[in-house]
Amino acid sequence: MSSPSKRRDMDVMKLMMSDYTVEPINDGINEFNVKFHGPKRSLYEGGVWKIHVELPDAYPYKSPSVGFLNKIYHPNVDEMSGSVCLDVINQSWNPMFDLFNIFEDFLPQLLLYPNPSDPLNSDAGSLMIKDKKLYEEKVKEYCERYAKKENISKTISEERNDISHEDISDGGSTPSDDNVAGEADS
């Protein structure tokens, strides 16, 4: 491979040619969203998430930034920002990995095998340890509310924008947690 930009182009094209829906942002290939389906035989099966990907100029030598745009209940995903705590992306990235690995291997493994002892979402991590059944119910509830195909059209920032405008227009009332990021308007 002669240059990082050729490798980036090839990796993005490989992802686009696969079964994933890739939506470029600002007509470039350094930033895009990918439609990601929860893995089979997991609590997340049937859910669909929009994953935001940003490729640094040094990609593939530097890891991409990856985050969930619609809400997900998982110990290793920050509920509000969608940031992912995954060593293979954050610390042990290797140029041998590519974007396809992220969506075919790394994210499915994250959802199949959460690590509650190193949480970004401490509530989810704690609940998973203390009451696995209640944790599983909450995961399924989030999937139902925030990860249906029809609900992924809005991103977290768009949803927050809507909430901010509602607050201003209706005299400053504070939305409940039920109306936060990721839920499409009815």
Image (cartoon, rainbow, N blue to C red):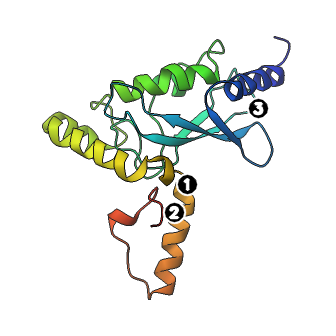
Q: Which residue is mark 2?
A: 159
What is the three-letter code of the residue carrying label 1?
Thr
Residue under the image location 48 percent in, 71 percent down: 163
| Residue 58 position (above or below residue 141) | above
Residue under label 1, please give it.
155
Q: Which residue type does callout 2 highlight?
A: Glu
Choose the circle earlier in sequence order: 2 or 3.
3
Check disc 3 and give the amino acid type. Answer: Asp
Provide the secondary structure element on which disc 3 rests. Answer: loop
Inter-mark Cα distance, 2 to 1: 6 Å
Q: Residue at x 34, y 63 (%)?
A: 178
Apparent side of residue 93 relative to residue 72 in the rendered image (left or right): right
- Judged by depth in the image, the label closer to the viewer, 2 or 3, is 2
The answer to whether residue 126 is visible is no
Q: Look at mark 3 in the image and give the residue it sits on.
A: 57
Residue 75: image quadrant is top left
Q: How many marks?
A: 3
Question: Looking at the image, is mark 1 or mark 3 nearer the viewer?
Answer: 1
Q: Residue at x 48, y 60 (%)?
A: 184
Q: Nearer the viewer, residue 145 or 106?
A: 145
Labels 2 & 1 near each other (Cβ < 8 A): yes
